Image: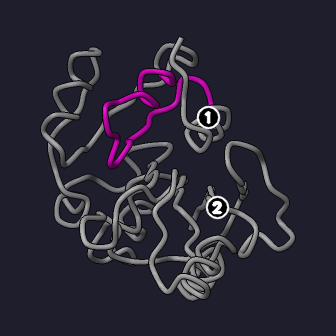
Amino acid sequence: MIDLRPDLAIIARNVAPDSRVLDIGCGDGALMAALRDRHGVDARGLEIDPANVSAAVARGLSVVQGDADTDLAGYPDQAFDYAILSRTLQTTRRPDRVLDHLLRIGRQAFVSFPNFAHWRVRASLLFGGRMPVNRLLPERWYDTPNIHHVTIDDFRAMVAERGIAIDAEWFLSGDKRARPAGANIFAEHAVFLLHR
């Protein structure tokens, strides 16, 4: 049995059995394998890192190497029940366009990301004057893949501006669920289920 990161476990629990899924930025395919093995999901993946593509293919998964910023345009409309983007939104050049593609390709989309407004991030900047390095954000500012520092409130505003509906939202502090009230300050990580 595959042990999933907390955000991936939330997504796995909320994907309907026997559905079709495209996991963009799928990493080594852990979520896809869990969905396939536990729920009979037809899972496909897109991953930029060749080593992760090889690891996912070695699990018997259908994964191609590609870039979310440039390669999603080739996927047909409504080809999947769910499009998933976990811990990838903040690494894309144009998160707004990637989100539009997710909701064009999938009937619903799961999006998860680290919350850069969490109180520890704020405290690190306020008291230390430096970008934090911690379990959730393990890279230093100069070698991080994160190029957009999104907050929960930023994300909610963006989806509202684009006419996107939020079907469900989950928040994490460490590996535990956090309350929605005050999530922009107290949640380290967010997971949203969306549709247009």
Q: Which residue is mark 2?
A: 188
User: Is residue 113 magenta-colored?
Assistant: no
Category of crowding for the residue at label 1, using alpha-carbon neighbours closer than 10 angstroms: few (below 14), some (14–19), many (at least 20): some
**Towards the viewer: 74 or 62:** 62
Residue 130's place in the image compared with 82, above or below, is below
Q: Which residue is mark 1?
A: 9
Q: Residue at x 17, y 38 (%)?
A: 64
Category of crowding for the residue at label 2, using alpha-carbon neighbours closer than 10 angstroms: few (below 14), some (14–19), many (at least 20): many
Residue 73's place in the image compared with 56, above or below, is below
Q: Point out residue 163 in the picture as x, y percentages from the top left corner.
A: 58, 81
Q: Which mark is residue 156?
A: none
N-term mark: 2 or 1: 1
Q: How is the image coloured?
A: one colour
Q: Residue at x 50, y 43 (%)?
A: 81
User: Magenta residues, as a range?
Assistant: 16-35
**Towards the viewer: 28 or 107:** 28
Q: Residue at x 64, y 61 (%)?
A: 188
At label 2, which amino acid type do we have?
A: Glu
Residue 8's place in the image compared with 173, above or below, is above
Q: Quadrant of residue 169?
A: bottom right
Residue 155's place in the image compared with 28, above or below, is below
